[in-house]
């Protein structure tokens, strides 16, 4: 439905322009009448309405520069500095205390990331430039010293991609190639998809499903390099497409074989697939092409619902930080290339991609440290992307922005400034207030659980409600909880299990305590959009046992407690009401819940009601739990989010009790609306 206009004046209405002219009725020369006072010139078009200063503060300063300028002036120089450091220090390179090539670093992709990242220095420097020979000699030296370093899966793909780019540029041949002959011979053997794929049936070896795309890309690039035939790449591509068709009822990748884990990669994967097809010039059947473009369009629609001036990306699930933003950049550039965007959407997508690039330069890159920062100054990412991978993460994020920029350049945007901030904001103002993106389920069957993403827009603030399951070990961590997320207001913390905005029940027993949370068994998910108010309801026929007997890596269904949940989203306010129903009488040791926030200056108002003096959150109140108190968590690493440290947590609990009748727990969160400036990362 169409939502009301923002309170802020975002853009002026269209002006009507008039023009005058004339001519003779016989086609002869026209002589205008002589006028004592010449007519006034036509009025100039009205200037665009100035953007509210808060909105300007919400977007990166470089938002209105051409994306290619940002890449040339900001990204390539950072890669150059890393190149000089690696060339000087070699295999003993140390960045921020991390010996990046050490076998214990945990970065099993690094040689490939080094190869692709540093390749851009060669590919963007003309041979006449004095630095060209330095880059050529240094690239060859670095390839030689890293040839025996661990390089798995993604690293293999990155290296193959670099080799193909260098080959097309003529840099693997001649008297002074970028890769020495001996090193290239070793790479031909070691850069192989068979390292993580069973060649008998093309099944992945203990990896999530997005690795089908990695394997396909390696096989296709090996074929282009003349190292093998086309059979493997064709089979792996079909394996990937079939997985989508089997486990992705609504066109989004399930990161498992049907267990229902959806996150950043579920939106991104189709973009990566299309990027690899573009990179390698591979065509597919008309039927598969229609499927692929249809899935790509669905990911675009998710991104459209989440567009914002700050360049913010995904806000829930694992492996976020800078990758939360570049995921959207990868999908949008592929969508432009594959013509699944309208002309207006292309301009808006380019403007948003430029903001993502500018945000990387201004927020994710720490000029003082000379590096990307996803680990310090209150920031935290999951252990998979630990600080030991600092060099690889610098290079892979830069790579994603550079190669997507190359696609925009090929589409004619090389020196094109993005649309004005006013035009961008006017487009955002036309977006629906609320959307439901379906991932899986929604068929009404008793054994089916619903997986989806609810997006609610309050002014320029984007609020997510993911109902996605986590599968594997992620279901128990709070970045996967079915609670609201919104940049600089609501966040999970990677690899942590404290009960953000949803209760956890601890059972009394003689052995290991059993802990249940409402995390994995949502069904009958329904959304009612009524003007400015959005109501979301779902039920759970069991809790997820995350500790104690029976709990393991995957969700463990425990039907001793069932529940119903109702969310109400309205401008400046979110309400959640849960009713938990026991199956018989249960002995509960305690119930706990927290609300960690970026706001501080908390005042207890009585009756579990709190106000905040600073930040976006203005108030928080709880019913159904007896004891709630604020705690300063600003120095606790378990409250460091991808974008910065949470400051306070309201911790609530209920003591031991006999649970025999339904228990209702309610919380209300009040926040500053429309929260314009606060959407920018701090």
Image: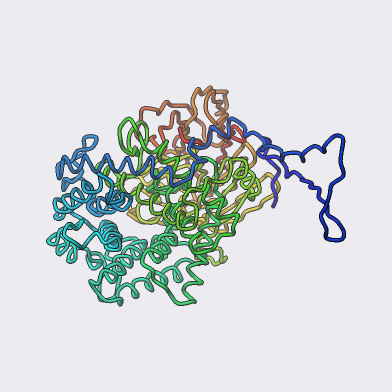
Q: Residue 541 in the image: x percent, y percent?
A: 51, 57
Q: Residue sitting at 52 percent across and 65 percent down? A: 250
Q: Residue 176 in the image: x percent, y percent?
A: 17, 57
Q: Residue 234 in the image: x percent, y percent?
A: 35, 75
Q: How many marks?
A: 0
- The residue furthest left is 182
Q: Residue sitting at 27 percent across and 76 percent down? A: 229
Q: Residue sitting at 44 percent across and 28 percent down? A: 647
Q: Quadrant of residue 77?
A: top left
Residue 583 in sight in this render: no
Q: Which coloring applies here? A: rainbow
Q: Residue 667 in the image: x percent, y percent?
A: 56, 37
Residue 371 in sight in this render: yes
| Between 556 and 171, the one nearer to me in the picture | 171
| Between 58 and 389, the one nearer to me in the picture | 58
Q: Quadrant of the C terminus?
A: top left
| Between 572 and 302, the one nearer to me in the picture | 302
Q: Using the image, determine if residue 127 lies above or below residue 290.
A: above
């Amino acid at each position: 439905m169409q939502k009301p206009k923002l309170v802020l004046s975002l853009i002026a209405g269209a002006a009507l322009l008039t023009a005058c002219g004339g001519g003779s009725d016989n086609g002869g020369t026209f002589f205008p009448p002589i006028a004592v006072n010449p007519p006034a010139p036509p009025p100039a078009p009205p200037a665009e309405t100035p953007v509210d200063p808060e909105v300007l503060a919400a977007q990166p300063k470089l938002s209105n520069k051409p994306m290619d300028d940002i890449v040339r002036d900001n990204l390539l120089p950072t890669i150059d500095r890393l190149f000089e450091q690696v060339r000087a220090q070699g295999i003993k390179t140390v960045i921020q205390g991390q010996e990046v090539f050490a076998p214990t670093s945990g970065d099993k992709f690094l040689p490939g990331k080094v190869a692709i990242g540093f390749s851009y220095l060669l590919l963007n420097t003309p041979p006449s430039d004095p630095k060209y020979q330095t880059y050529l000699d240094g690239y060859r030296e670095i390839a030689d010293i890293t040839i025996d370093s661990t390089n798995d899966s993604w690293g293999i793909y990155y290296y193959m991609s670099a080799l193909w780019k260098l080959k097309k540029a003529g840099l693997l041949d001649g008297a002074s190639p970028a890769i020495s002959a001996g090193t290239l011979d070793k790479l031909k053997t070691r850069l192989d998809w068979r390292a993580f794929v069973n060649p008998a049936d093309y099944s992945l070896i203990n990896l999530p499903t997005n690795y089908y795309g990695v394997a396909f890309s390696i096989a296709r690039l090996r074929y282009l390099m003349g190292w093998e035939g086309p059979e493997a790449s064709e089979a792996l591509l079909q394996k990937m497409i079939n997985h989508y068709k089997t486990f992705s009822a609504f066109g989004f990748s399930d990161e498992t074989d049907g267990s229902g884990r959806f996150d950043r990669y579920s939106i991104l994967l189709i973009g990566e697939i299309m990027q690899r097809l573009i990179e390698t010039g591979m065509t597919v059947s008309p039927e598969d092409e229609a499927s692929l473009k249809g899935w790509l369009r669905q990911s675009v629609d998710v991104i459209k619902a989440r567009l914002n001036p700050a360049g913010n990306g995904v806000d829930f699930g694992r492996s976020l930080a800078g990758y939360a933003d570049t995921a959207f950049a990868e999908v949008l550039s592929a969508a432009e290339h594959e013509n699944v965007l309208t002309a207006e959407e292309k301009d808006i997508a380019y403007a948003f991609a430029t903001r993502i690039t500018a945000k990387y330069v201004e927020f994710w890159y720490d000029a003082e440290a000379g590096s990307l920062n996803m680990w310090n100054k209150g920031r935290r990412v999951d252990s998979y992307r630990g600080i030991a991978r600092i060099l690889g993460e610098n290079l892979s994020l830069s790579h994603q922005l550079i190669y997507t920029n190359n696609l925009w350049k090929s589409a004619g945007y090389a020196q094109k400034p993005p649309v004005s901030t006013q035009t961008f904001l006017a487009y955002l103002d036309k977006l629906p207030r609320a959307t439901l993106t379906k991932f899986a389920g929604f068929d009404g069957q008793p054994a089916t659980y619903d997986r989806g993403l609810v997006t609610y827009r309050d002014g320029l603030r984007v609020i997510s409600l993911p109902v996605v399951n986590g599968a594997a070990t992620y279901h128990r961590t709070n970045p996967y909880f079915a609670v609201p997320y919104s940049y600089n207001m609501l966040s999970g913390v990677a690899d942590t299990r404290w009960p953000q905005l949803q209760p956890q029940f601890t059972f009394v027993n003689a052995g290991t305590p059993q802990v249940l949370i409402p995390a994995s068994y949502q069904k009958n998910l329904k959304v009612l959009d009524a003007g400015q108010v959005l109501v979301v309801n779902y039920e759970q026929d069991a809790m997820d046992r995350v500790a104690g007997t029976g709990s393991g890596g995957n969700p463990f269904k425990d039907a001793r407690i069932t529940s119903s949940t109702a969310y109400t989203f309205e401008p400046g306010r979110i309400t959640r009401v849960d009713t938990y129903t026991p199956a018989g009488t249960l002995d509960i040791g305690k119930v706990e819940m927290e609300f960690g926030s970026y706001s501080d200056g908390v005042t207890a108002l009585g009756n579990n009601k709190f106000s905040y003096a600073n930040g976006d959150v203005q108030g928080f109140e709880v019913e159904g739990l007896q004891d709630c108190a604020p705690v300063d968590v600003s120095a606790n690493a378990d409250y460091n989010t991808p974008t910065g440290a949470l400051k306070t947590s309201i911790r609530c609990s209920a003591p031991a009790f006999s649970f025999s009748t339904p228990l209702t727990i309610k919380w209300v969160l009040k926040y500053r609306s429309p929260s314009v400036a606060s959407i920018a990362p701090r």
